[in-house]
Image (spheres, helix red, strand yellow):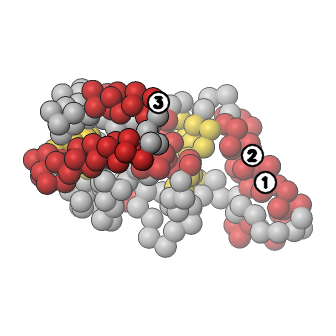
Amino acid sequence: MKTKSSRLPIYIELPESTLLEGGTFFVRLQTLDQLDEFWRKHRDKFAFACEGKISSEPSFLHEYEWVFGSSKAAVVRTVLRWGQSGIGCEFYDWAKHDSQMHELFFLDRDAERYSKIEKGIWSEKDEVDFRTDCVRRSVETYRGWWRFCNLPNGYSSNEWLNGGQCFEELIDPHMAYQEVAITLQVQAFDDWRQSDFWELESHDGESIDELIRYWKNERAERGGYYGDENESPESIS
């Protein structure tokens, strides 16, 4: 889906070096020394961060732009310009909008069980897992799921989170919207940390420490490193 906003999130300006709503902090750190100095001064204030990576057409953050915060959800809300960009959450009613595939899901689930039973490769654990899933995801209870909506630049709502990460699927249409939003925001943060999403990378304190150590080693070995193109000749010599 396209965003309802006339502007991409990246065009919604974030005040720099100012504590924002939710306790987040937006800052541009153009060099490795700036990143290192900022983190030494503020590491006790912020547990999480999101870093803008190099991109020809960024939607959320430019390279060297950072959002720091005390919670994963707060960082993601700031990055997405939640409440301003049009990005939100919706319940996708799968059974209503794609009834054939909804029906096939349950037929395929049963068929897989019968096939493995006939082949003698269906274990007691498989049966327990199957019955547990049937209770949670029956034809009546599993009609769809909550997802992000109004994502920019043609990002697919169904593909926004990497399914391989085994995130909890939110299937209760009556779930409180705020609870849904926070859960999906945390999932997005974790996905940016673990996936190869080229535009953003999220961090905890340990990974920021690792990042700084890595770039310092690269600099010491005369390799390319974070922000080297932004340094003055005097600072390099």
Q: In which quarter of the image is residue 49?
A: top right
Q: Can residue 81 be seen in this view?
A: no
The residue located at (82%, 61%) in the rendering is 218
Q: State the SS at label 3.
A: helix
How far is the residue under mark 1 from the one under mark 2? 6 Å
Left or right: where 108 falls relative to 189: left
Q: Where is residue 113 in the image (x, y as percent from the top left)?
A: 34, 42
Tag 2 near tag 3, CB within 8 Å: no
How far is the residue under mark 3 from the one under mark 1? 43 Å
On screen, 34 above or below 58? above
Of callouts 2 and 3, the N-terminal one: 3
Q: Position of residue 104 (x, y in %)?
A: 20, 51
Which quarter of the image is occupied by the N terminus?
bottom left
Q: Name the residue under label 2.
A: 210
Q: State the SS at label 2.
A: helix
Tag 1 near tag 2, CB within 8 Å: yes
Query: Which one is in front, 208 or 235?
Result: 208
Q: Name the residue under label 3.
A: 125
Q: Name the residue under label 1.
A: 214
On screen, 120 above or below 22? below
